[in-house]
Image (spheres, helix red, strand yellow):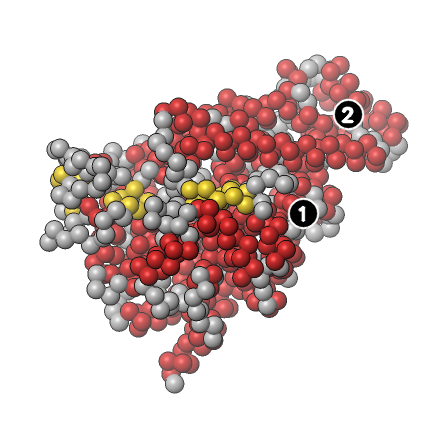
């Protein structure tokens, strides 16, 4: 789920530093009156000094500087002496300036990241109570002033004077011909494509921290849910985080022949109450009350959790649209940044043109390609056959294609808890896990040396080091009795992120190219690991043609589901920008309407039920700034990558080759990795083939 590199961007903590963007074209009229004459004069002067070939670069650099220069940066004399002193007219000077930026920014990013992690430690880790002061620490962003500082001391202007700012269109058109160094220069300049005041960054970071806190505290105490007969379907102590754990429990319930369907219906009812905000405020993260989600009746808990006194006189007064007020707050945080981001003046533009570097239209097209594929209805028929009943809407989370383990969830929990009683035990086992995934022993140990494991409050989290030689953090939820299977499954996913983070920062040729092109790529790596979780427990995993076909259908069905969720997220952000003055209640109605609309268009024809709202349950929509499209994109890419890895015969060496290519344009990265650009074709082809294989078996 929430990866740190994205988080730095999401929280706007490093907004000036992780922005990747286009040339801000400030209107000429806003420039100081002397600026144009000054640029022309200097252009001639520099062409004489360094030779005619330097002319074009000098003009471009000065134009870039001019587009951010403010009155407080100095007068005509200050501008001219700055340019004379800092324009690199010869290769040696340019190389030296480039080298300084590369070395210093690696350290700067890493240390700032470390400080930020320390600030958030108590809030993030399951290490005791959170004091009010911890929340203040967590909301503070040490890097928030860097953008201001580097414009004020003109470091930013040195980069803008000497290295090119590019638009997404330019990167798409020219990127294939650029050298690695040219790409590194492009990434360097992109760090200064926005000039956001620190006050704005700090305000936005505070809002982000509040939204995250709202999401990470939204637990449901499952043993306290009652059905109409007063029965408790879920075990004592079970506390599920919305929506991740609720959805995963729903998925796990397919394996419970007796109570599974009743549990699933109850989870769906809980989800609907969260989405519609008819959930009683008193039941959120509260083991002191019992709740019937069907009747919405709330009463003092009749069973007692350790140290919890039943509530005296609880009411079922509903949560007052806090979910949507929180979402609106993240929209308002984005709007604060908009005026300082001239060529990507909305969060939507920043997400697609800058963070993802795939145009929104193309992402939308890929989502629709999956959602509207006739393969969905064919797969649905197969699911109905396997379930022996008509599909229910919650079967968008059908998990029965997953390689069937001969073991129950409880047994898996026991196996995992025995193997990993503490986060430290998991950390010690990382080299072995990596060897099982095909990494050479020495490389596995090298990678593992760069990963530390901590107990998380949330469900799981991977955070890269930010600099060469630093430690990537894997945050995982370990209960007092040891890690459970769900936690393990998520930890393996997060480990995929961590390995990518370690390789793509330590083994890439330019640290300015550290990372992967966008978060969907790191998701793809995480999925690659996660899919092998049972094998990592040394449990037998079938690997014949049928098992492969089932795995392919599992990929497809998961992508079909999350592509719809992504379409909802995208439509909701457009709605917010179209209705900037909306109230939380209006936003709630809009989200519900959008969720129904996407459902009715792409899912109702398959499920034969209309007006389902479940696509709106994802918590990312509330606190993650249009992050959800990265999941289906990650699925598409992981199928592409998985195919390549399979051809190669093992994950390790291919993972290393791919992950060290660095943060170039997504399509270029994917071409290096697999030979094709990013797309849905591999997934759809694999699904069609799987349906054919399973169809033939059924026909026999
Ligand atoms: Zn992830």
Per the image, label 2 sits on a secondary structure element best described as: helix
Foreground disc of the pair 1, 2: 1
Name the residue located 36 percent from the left edge and 25 percent from the top edge.
Answer: 132
Q: Is residue 37 above or below residue 583?
A: above
Q: Is residue 49 visible?
A: yes
Name the residue located 31 percent from the left edge and 40 percent from the top edge.
Answer: 218
Q: Which residue is mark 1?
A: 508
The tag on residue 631 is none
The quarter holding residue 220 reads top left
Residues 28 and 407: in front is 407
Return the x and y of residue 360 as percentages of the image width and height: 51, 47
Return the x and y of residue 688 as percentages of the image width and height: 46, 71
Give the farthest residue toward the left.
Answer: 229
Q: Is residue 394 above or below residue 386?
A: above
86 horizontally vs 298: left or right = right
Q: Count the numbered circles shown.
A: 2
Mark 1 vs ligand 1: CB below 8 Å: no
490 horizontally vs 268: left or right = right
| Mark 2 crowd level (few <14, some 14–19, many ≥20, 10 Å Cα) | some
Per the image, label 1 sits on a secondary structure element best described as: loop
| Mark 1 crowd level (few <14, some 14–19, many ≥20, 10 Å Cα) | many
Return the x and y of residue 185 as percentages of the image width and height: 71, 39
Return the x and y of residue 532 as percentages of the image width and height: 47, 61
Name the residue located 28 percent from the left edge and 59 percent from the top edge.
Answer: 253
Residues 380 and 587: in front is 380
Q: Is residue 266 above or below residue 384?
A: above
Give the farthest residue toward the bottom.
Answer: 700
The tag on residue 86 is 2
């Amino acid at each position: 789920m929430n990866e740190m590199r994205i988080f730095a961007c999401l929280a706007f903590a490093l907004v000036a530093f992780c922005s990747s963007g286009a040339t801000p074209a400030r209107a000429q009229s806003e420039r100081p009156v002397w600026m144009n004459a000054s640029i022309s004069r200097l252009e001639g002067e520099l062409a004489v000094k360094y030779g005619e070939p330097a002319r074009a670069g000098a003009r471009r650099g000065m134009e870039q500087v001019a587009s951010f220069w403010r009155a407080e940066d100095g007068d005509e004399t200050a501008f001219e002496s700055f340019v004379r002193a800092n324009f690199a007219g010869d290769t040696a000077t340019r190389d030296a300036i480039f080298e300084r930026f590369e070395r210093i920014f690696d350290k700067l990013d890493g240390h700032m990241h470390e400080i930020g992690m320390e600030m958030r430690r108590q809030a993030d880790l399951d290490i005791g109570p959170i004091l009010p002061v911890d929340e203040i620490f967590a909301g503070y962003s040490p890097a928030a002033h860097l953008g201001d500082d580097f414009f004020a001391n003109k470091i930013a202007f040195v980069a803008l004077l000497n290295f090119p700012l590019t638009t997404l269109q330019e990167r798409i058109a020219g990127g294939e011909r650029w050298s690695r160094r040219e790409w590194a220069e492009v990434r360097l300049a992109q760090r200064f494509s926005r000039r956001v005041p620190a006050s704005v960054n700090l305000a936005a970071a505070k809002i982000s921290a509040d939204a995250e806190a709202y999401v990470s505290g939204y637990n449901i105490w499952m043993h306290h849910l009652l059905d109409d007969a007063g029965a408790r379907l879920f075990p004592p102590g079970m506390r599920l985080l919305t929506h991740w754990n609720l959805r995963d429990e729903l998925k796990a319930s397919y394996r419970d022949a007796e109570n599974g369907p009743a549990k699933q219906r109850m989870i769906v009812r809980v989800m609907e109450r969260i989405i519609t905000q008819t959930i009683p405020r008193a039941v959120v993260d509260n083991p002191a009350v019992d709740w019937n989600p069907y009747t919405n009746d709330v009463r003092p808990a009749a069973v007692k959790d350790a140290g919890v006194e039943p509530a005296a006189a609880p009411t079922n007064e509903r949560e007052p649209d806090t979910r949507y007020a929180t979402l609106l707050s993240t929209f308002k945080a984005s709007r604060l940044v908009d005026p300082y981001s001239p060529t990507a003046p909305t969060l939507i533009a920043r997400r697609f043109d800058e963070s993802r570097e795939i145009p929104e239209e193309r992402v939308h097209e890929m989502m629709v390609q999956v959602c509207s594929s006739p393969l969905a209805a064919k797969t649905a028929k197969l699911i109905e056959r396997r379930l022996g009943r008509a599909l229910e809407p919650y079967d968008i989370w059908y998990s029965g294609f997953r390689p069937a383990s001969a073991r129950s969830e409880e047994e898996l929990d026991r196996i995992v808890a025995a193997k990993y009683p503490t986060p430290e035990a998991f950390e010690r086992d990382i080299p072995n896990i990596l060897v099982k995934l095909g990494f050479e022993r020495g490389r596995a140990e090298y990678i593992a040396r760069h990963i530390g494991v901590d107990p998380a409050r949330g469900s799981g989290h991977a955070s890269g080091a930010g600099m060469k030689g630093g430690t990537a953090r894997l945050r995982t939820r370990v209960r007092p009795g040891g890690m459970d299977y769900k936690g393990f499954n998520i930890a393996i996913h997060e480990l995929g992120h961590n390995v990518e983070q370690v390789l793509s920062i330590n083994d890439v040729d330019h640290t300015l190219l550290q990372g992967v092109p966008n978060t969907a790529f790191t998701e793809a790596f995480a999925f690659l690991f996660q899919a092998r979780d049972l094998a990592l427990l040394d449990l037998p995993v079938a690997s014949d043609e049928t098992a492969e076909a089932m795995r392919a259908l599992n990929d497809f069905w998961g992508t079909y589901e999350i592509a719809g969720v992504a379409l909802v997220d995208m439509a909701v952000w457009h709605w917010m920008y179209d209705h900037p003055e909306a109230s939380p209640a209006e936003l709630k109605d809009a989200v519900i309407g959008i969720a129904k609309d996407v459902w009715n268009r792409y899912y109702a024809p398959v499920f034969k039920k209309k007006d389902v709202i479940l696509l709106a349950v994802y918590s990312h929509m509330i606190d993650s700034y249009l992050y959800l499209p990265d999941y289906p994109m990650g699925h598409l890419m992981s199928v592409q990558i998985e195919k390549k890895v399979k051809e190669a015969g093992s994950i390790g060496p291919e993972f290393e080759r791919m992950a060290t290519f660095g943060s170039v344009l997504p399509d270029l990265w994917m071409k290096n990795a697999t030979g094709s650009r990013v797309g849905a074709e591999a997934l759809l082809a694999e699904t069609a083939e799987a349906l054919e294989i399973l169809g033939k078996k059924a026909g026999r």
